[in-house]
Structure formats: C-alpha cells, structure tokens
Image (cartoon, rainbow, N blue to C red):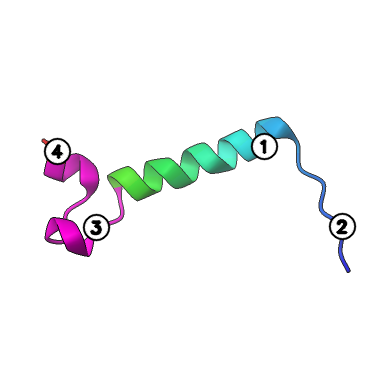
C-alpha cells in the first residue's frame, strides 16, 4: 500500500484550488447551470 506524505500548506493549496473551481468555474444544475458566483451576482 502506498504511503502519502502531504504538508499542511500543500493541503491548503489543494483545498483552495478546489473551492475556487467549485465556486467560479463549475456550473451547477440547481442554479440553472450557472456558477455559484454568477448566480449570486
């Protein structure tokens, strides 16, 4: 089984990128295929 080593800073960077993509780039069906940021505007 592989062992993964990840730093807290790296985990924060990856999480920040995921949240940014989710809120700014990914359209959501429940929002009529708009991004959450476009829907909120």
The residue identified by callout 2 is 3
Mark 2–mark 3 distance (CA, rounded to whole Å): 34 Å
Q: Is residue 40 magenta?
A: no
Q: Residues within 10 Å of mark 2 (few under 14, many from 20)?
A: few
Give the mark nearest the N terminus, 2 or 4: 2
Mark 3 — residue? 27
* Disc 4: CA contacts within 10 A as few (<14), some (14-19) or many (>=20): few
Q: Height in image: 21 above or below 33?
A: above
The secondary structure type at the circle numbered 3 is loop
Residue found 13% across the figure and 45% down from its top: 39
**Alpha-carbon neighbours of circle 1 within 10 Å: few (<14), some, or many (≥20)?**
few
In this view, 1 is above or below 10: below
State the separation of the CA atoms marked 2 and 1.
Answer: 16 Å
Disc number for residue 40 = 4
Residues at discs 4 and 1 in contact (Cβ within 8 Å): no
Q: Which residues are magenta?
A: 25-39
- Residue 1 vs 41, above or below: the answer is below
Please tell me which residue is depicted at 30% across the width and 55% down the height of the picture.
Answer: 26
In which quadrant is the C terminus drawn? Answer: top left
Q: Which element carries disc 2, helix, strand or loop?
A: loop
Decide which of tag 4 and tag 1 comes sooner along the chain: 1
Q: Nearer the viewer, mark 4 or mark 1?
A: 4
Give left or right: position of 3 versus 40.
right
Q: Earlier in the sequence, mark 2 or mark 1?
A: 2
Could you say where residue 36 lies in the image, as x and y percent from the top left? Answer: 22, 45
Asked if residue 27 is among those painted magenta in the image, a careful observer would answer: yes
Q: Earlier in the sequence, mark 3 or mark 1?
A: 1
Which mark is in front, 3 or 4?
A: 4
Q: Which residue is mark 1?
A: 10
């Amino acid at each position: 089984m592989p062992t993964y080593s990840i730093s807290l800073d790296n985990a924060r960077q990856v999480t920040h990128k995921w949240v940014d993509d989710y809120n700014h780039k990914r359209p959501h069906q429940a929002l009529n295929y708009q991004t959450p940021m476009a829907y909120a505007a």
